[in-house]
Amino acid sequence: MSDTRNSSSQSALDWIVSNTQARLTITDCGEFPTPEGKVVFLDPLAHPPSPNFVDVPKKSSRLVVLHDEDQGRNSKLVLIFNDNAIASGADVGTCLVSTGLASVFTPTTFAGLKAFAASLKPGQDPYNKFFCKFDDPNGGERKIVLLPDGTPVPYVHAGWGDGGYPVFTLTDTQGTICAIFADFMGCDQNGKWLTPPGVTLE
């Protein structure tokens, strides 16, 4: 495929798809508001008590999951804020996964998850009490589920499962964030990470 990584004529979603060699199915999971302007990608069932949030636009985004049809696994978890042409981006963190699942949270939704866990009776846990009913037997979970109090929690199987996955922003020529995504499977058969234009991982 041609290298369009330095192109400034594609939206974030188009850029991700065109620079990933696998056949991808796009699932739009719906609106995901970020009114506090901060998000973090992490495992919804195993995570630090005080994660490091990344600054993003204070507006609504679309939660999109890209599914690798050849491997039958989720390739990318993306929040899209606008359709501006992307010009660059940054490496902004790592999504650590230890239960096979990945999600994205704002400070408010993360607090909602912690409150839900704290509300459970002794011997209960969030997975067996709630999340297990949303499992896909084929490991293709890609949806937003609502906690009993209405808190939205993306529920996505993370590519190859447990591990550390890079999180990148994509920005336009003005430096505005167009999207932020966790890359579970890379951009080619060797698993090379899909880094934004101008970004090199050491």
Image: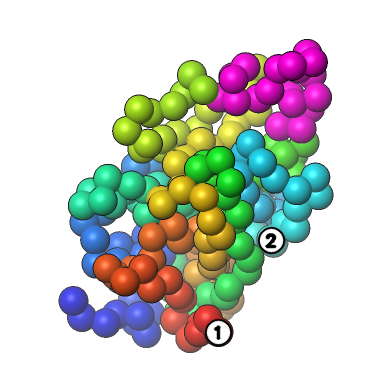
Mark 1 highlights which residue?
Answer: 202
Magenta stretch: residue 120 in it?
yes
Location of mark 2 (residue): 54
Q: Looking at the picture, which amino acid does disc 1 mark? A: Glu
Q: Residue furthest front?
A: 123
For this view, does 108 lie left or right of residue 132? right
From the viewer's side, name the closer residue of 41 and 54: 41
Q: Amino acid at mark 2?
A: Val
Disc 2 secondary structure class: strand
The colour scheme is rainbow
CA neighbours of label 2 inside 10 A, class few (<14), some (14 to 19), many (20+): some
Which residue is nearer to you in this view: 53 or 122?
122
User: The C terminus lies in which quarter of the figure?
Assistant: bottom right
Rendering coords of residue 29 (x, y %): 42, 38
Q: State the CA–CA distance, disc 1 to disc 2.
A: 21 Å
Q: Which residues are magenta?
A: 113-131
Q: Quadrant of residue 185?
A: bottom left
Q: Is residue 62 visible?
A: no
Q: Position of residue 12 (x, y in %)?
A: 41, 64
